[in-house]
């Protein structure tokens, strides 16, 4: 059984295979259209979504599969207090594959533990958003051939933006050089920085304003302030409206730079850039459909090209209490905290659910 909870669940080789399959599906849909006939995708969206849910539904239905699910958890048994574990066990009987989005970090990991069908993480709290990162990488590769050697600036709410987290880890893994651009309270959290350094040998330059580095960037990835995740002790007024990519800033960027954004945008990416040939954000959302088609078919084992051995995770039971209040272990009481140690010589100890450092 294979899941996609974080990008660590796929090897680089498998990611490249998914890109090849996505590209084939994009150019020759009729060849693949029947592959999911009589299969069902459950879309369990405990948090708002436009692109992720609709592109997953579009992906499944273009492959002649069906979809069922919810976009409003207040109309489900979650409102009566049902746990994720019980929902996972039950949905196993109704569908062949699950995509779940939840406001708690680690929710998709819990679903994967209790469901007997593949689970895809459609975004878990401020943790990760692996399918967005796959669509992002695929978009870069289609324009620039490869990620290796590119200088990639990630700008905005890097503290709470799960799309920014997955994207940073993905870029580093495929050999891109990162620059983190954010006001200090919104800079990347320690667990991402530790992972970048220990696994990929990167200590990204951190700057507060995009104008400081704009000339260097091959890719500028902007994300919105994650208002709904800001802790009550944070001075939101100080960071609100503190960054903006507009035509004036882009005058100083490379002619062949790419402007990316996972969307939705609020006030950090000017509409005047939409006609700039460097804008790639609508392409990103369009590419999410073939990527999700390829992923669904692969995880269900309908397409032979993957999967090799699941990458090893070194998990041990632990008595830790995760300090991350957004972690599911602080919300669902039946879970035994687990500690994950990265393989090989790396001694990084993290919470197996939300990725936060434990030491
Ligand atoms: C992102 C998300 O939900 O994390 N949106 C998306 O899936 N494309 C980004 C965001 O909400 O800011």
Image (spheres, grey):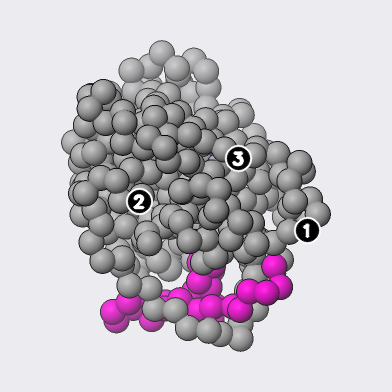
Residue found 30% across the figure and 51% down from its top: 301
Asked if one can make out residue 306 in the rendered structure from this viewpoint, the answer is yes
Q: Residues within 10 Å of mark 2 (few under 14, many from 20)?
A: many
Asked if one can make out residue 349 in the rendered structure from this viewpoint, the answer is no
Q: Position of residue 346 (x, y in %)?
A: 34, 78
Secondary element under disc 1, as helix, strand or loop, is loop
Q: Report the magenta stretch's main SS.
A: loop
Task: Indicate whether 6 appears above or below 316.
Answer: above
Residue identified by numbered label 1: 81
Q: CA distance from mark 2 to mark 1?
A: 30 Å
Q: Position of residue 158 (x, y in %)?
A: 52, 49
Image marks 2 and 1: residues in contact by CB distance under 8 Å:
no
Q: Residues within 10 Å of mark 1 (few under 14, many from 20)?
A: few
Residue identified by numbered label 2: 299
Which stretch did the figure color magenta?
332-359
- The image quadrant where one finds the N terminus is bottom left
The first of marks 2 and 1 along the sequence is: 1
Residue found 40% across the figure and 66% down from its top: 195
Residue found 26% across the figure and 23% down from its top: 30
Q: Which mark is residue 69?
A: 3
In the image, 230: left or right of 252? Answer: right
Q: In which image quadrant can residue 348 be found?
A: bottom left
Does the segment drawn in magenta span residue 352? yes
Residue found 29% across the figure and 81% down from its top: 345
Camera-nearest residue between 98 and 341: 98
Ligand 1 contact, mark 1 (Cβ < 8 Å): no
Q: Position of residue 185 (x, y in %)?
A: 61, 54
In the image, 258: left or right of 208? Answer: left
The first of marks 1 and 3 along the sequence is: 3
Secondary element under disc 2, as helix, strand or loop, is helix
Camera-nearest residue between 158 and 255: 158
Does the segment drawn in magenta span residue 46? no
């Amino acid at each position: 059984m294979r899941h996609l909870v974080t990008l660590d669940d796929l090897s680089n080789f498998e990611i490249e295979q998914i890109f090849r399959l996505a590209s084939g599906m994009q150019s020759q849909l009729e060849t693949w259209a029947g592959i999911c006939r009589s299969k069902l995708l459950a879309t369990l969206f405990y948090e708002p979504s436009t692109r992720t849910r609709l592109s997953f539904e579009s992906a499944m239905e273009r492959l002649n599969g069906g979809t069922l699910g919810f976009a409003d958890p207040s109309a489900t048994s979650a409102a009566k207090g049902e746990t994720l574990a019980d929902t996972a066990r039950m949905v196993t009987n109704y569908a062949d594959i699950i995509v779940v989005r939840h406001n708690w970090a680690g929710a998709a990991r819990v679903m994967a533990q209790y469901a007997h069908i593949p689970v895809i993480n459609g975004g878990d709290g401020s943790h990760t958003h692996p399918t967005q990162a796959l669509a992002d990488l695929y978009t870069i590769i289609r324009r620039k051939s490869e990620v290796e050697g590119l200088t990639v600036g990630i700008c905005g709410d890097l503290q709470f933006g799960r799309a920014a987290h997955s994207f940073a880890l993905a870029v580093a893994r495929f050999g891109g050089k990162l620059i983190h651009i954010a006001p200090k309270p919104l800079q990347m959290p320690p667990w991402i920085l530790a992972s970048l350094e220990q696994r990929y040998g990167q200590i990204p330059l951190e700057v507060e304003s995009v104008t400081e580095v704009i000339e260097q960037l091959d890719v500028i990835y902007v994300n919105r302030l994650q208002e709904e995740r800001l802790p009550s002790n944070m001075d939101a007024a100080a960071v609100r409206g503190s960054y903006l990519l507009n035509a004036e800033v882009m005058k100083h960027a490379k002619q062949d730079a790419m402007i990316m954004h996972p969307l939705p945008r609020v006030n950090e990416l000017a509409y005047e850039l939409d006609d700039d040939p460097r804008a790639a954000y609508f392409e990103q959302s369009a590419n999410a459909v073939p990527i999700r088609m390829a992923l669904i078919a692969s995880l269900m084992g309908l397409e032979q090209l993957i999967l090799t051995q699941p990458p090893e995770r070194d998990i041990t039971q632990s008595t830790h209490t995760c300090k991350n209040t957004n972690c599911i272990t602080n919300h669902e009481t039946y879970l035994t905290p687990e500690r994950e140690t990265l393989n090989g010589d790396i001694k990084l100890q993290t919470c197996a659910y939300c990725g936060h450092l434990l030491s």
